[in-house]
Amino acid sequence: MIVPSRKTKESGVTGSAMWDERLRHFERQRERMVETIREFVEIESPSDNKPAADRMAIFLAAKFEARGGRCRLHRARDFGDNLQIDFEGSSGAQSAKRKPVLLLGHYDTVYPLGTLASMPCKLDQGRLHGPGVLDMKSGIALIFHAIEALQTWHGELPRPATVFLVSDEEVGSHSSRKITEALAKKSAGVLVLEPAAGLRGAVKTARKGVGEYTLRVRGVAAHAGLDPGKGHSAIVELARQITVIAKMNNLGQGTSVNAGVIEGGTRTNVVAAAASVAVDVRIKKAKQASAIDRRFRALKPFDKNCKLEIAGGINRLPMERTAGVAALYQQARKIAAEMQWSLDEAAVGGGSDGNFTAGMGIPTLDGMGGVGEGAHAVHEYIVISELPRRALLLAGMIESV
Ligand SMILES: [Zn+2]
């Protein structure tokens, strides 16, 4: 829906003219933005392949260094190195006093090395396709172009900014979480460049919390033909446990539990000695975390000869729509209105590193990245015509957070 821009004292005719000119700037940059995204997509960077991921980190470091950023690679043993880039901001007294804004993203993707061969980066009818193009290499490109534009318009970046691009977001952010939290603590606010919600491009002001549990059952093996009575099947026990776990679902309260992967047994003629299930858990409120955790840890075997072992927990607490989150959204709405754009907000089920920073009480706005569909899927794409206003929204937020 198109709404007319409000002609208030602060954003009068001159204000609107400025935003129009800025939008035209990004319209002129559109092809360059597409090329930047293509460069990023064509360097494959799966979370589970350190050498490949490191190549991406080094490429990004050089790219941002050329814009005057100070790069620091935080070494990670099992994942790509996490990349921090600091921009000082202009030396004016006002800028120097401001805390940096944290621009948060991840450069890892869920696609195994070699995916480009079957899923090449290609332009088609106003869309750019490719592995990770939406989630979230276009988001990283938006950061790059927003910073570049601000430097062009102001001579220097008008305030300090820290870009943090992590290597392991898609697999739980184990190597990067502490650094993300430390940087968030020092920042005025966090803008997360995850994809926007839906094709209307809503920003994300609430996310569910995410956890993963593994239940392992140890039974007693026996020959299924000779001694069936002596065995205690881990598979039968696991099947009964899964029905208990499935009852933890409470969609009305926003809790969902999915027994997603089961393993167990060795041969048909052996009573299974071991079986396990991996379970994905989503919660809406932080206070639901301990309740669900207690229920997992309270699981008791039906067959006393079987033993249960539970591992895992809630990894990301929900990103709740706090006053700080709502204030950032209002600010983003104001900037969008300058472009005659009515910016929506959305609550989504997936977690991101924004859950960590919002959970610490730092104002966080997520879903600032590209607009498209098919994240993690073979048809993943972004809508190219959305890039200019996304870049301008981000630039405006970097100025004002
Ligand atoms: Zn993502």
Image: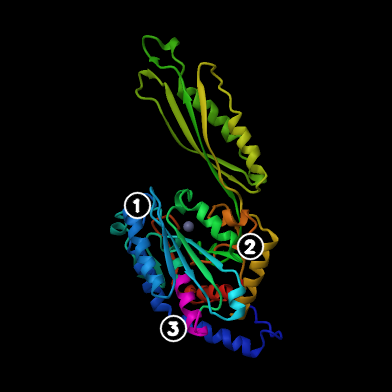
Residue visible at 43% across and 24% down in the picture: 274
Mark 3 = which residue?
A: 28
Horizontal and vertical percent for residue 331? 65, 72
Q: Which residue in the protein does label 2 denote?
A: 363
Whether residue 309 sits left or right of residue 98 in the image: it is left
Given contact means CB atoms under 8 Å apart, are the residues at marks 2 and 3 in contact? no
> Which circle's residue, 2 or 1, is located before the other in the chain?
1
How far is disc 2 from disc 1 in space, using C-alphas?
32 Å
- Residue that appears at 35% across and 57% down: 54
Count numbered badges in the picture.
3
Residue 260 percent location from the top left of the image? 48, 39
State the SS at label 1.
helix
Residue range (magenta): 142-156
Quadrant placement of the N terminus:
bottom right
Query: Going by the picture, which residue comes out furthest to the bottom?
Result: 14
> For the residues carrying marks 2 and 3, which lies nearer the camera in this image?
2
**Label 2: which secondary element:** loop
Per the rendering, the mark at residue 395 is: none
Can residue 195 be seen in the rendering of this structure? Answer: no
Mark 3 Cα-neighbour bin, 10 Å: few <14, some 14–19, many ≥20: few
Q: CA distance from mark 2 to mark 3?
A: 32 Å
| Viewer-nearest of discs 1 and 3 | 1
Local packing at callout 1 (Cα closer than 10 Å; few below 14, some 14-19, many 20+) is: some
Give the residue type at disc 2. Answer: Pro
Residue to which mark 1 is pinned: 50
Percent coordinates x, y for residue 131 in the rendering: 38, 59
**10 Å crowding of disc 2: few (<14), some (14-19), many (20+):** many
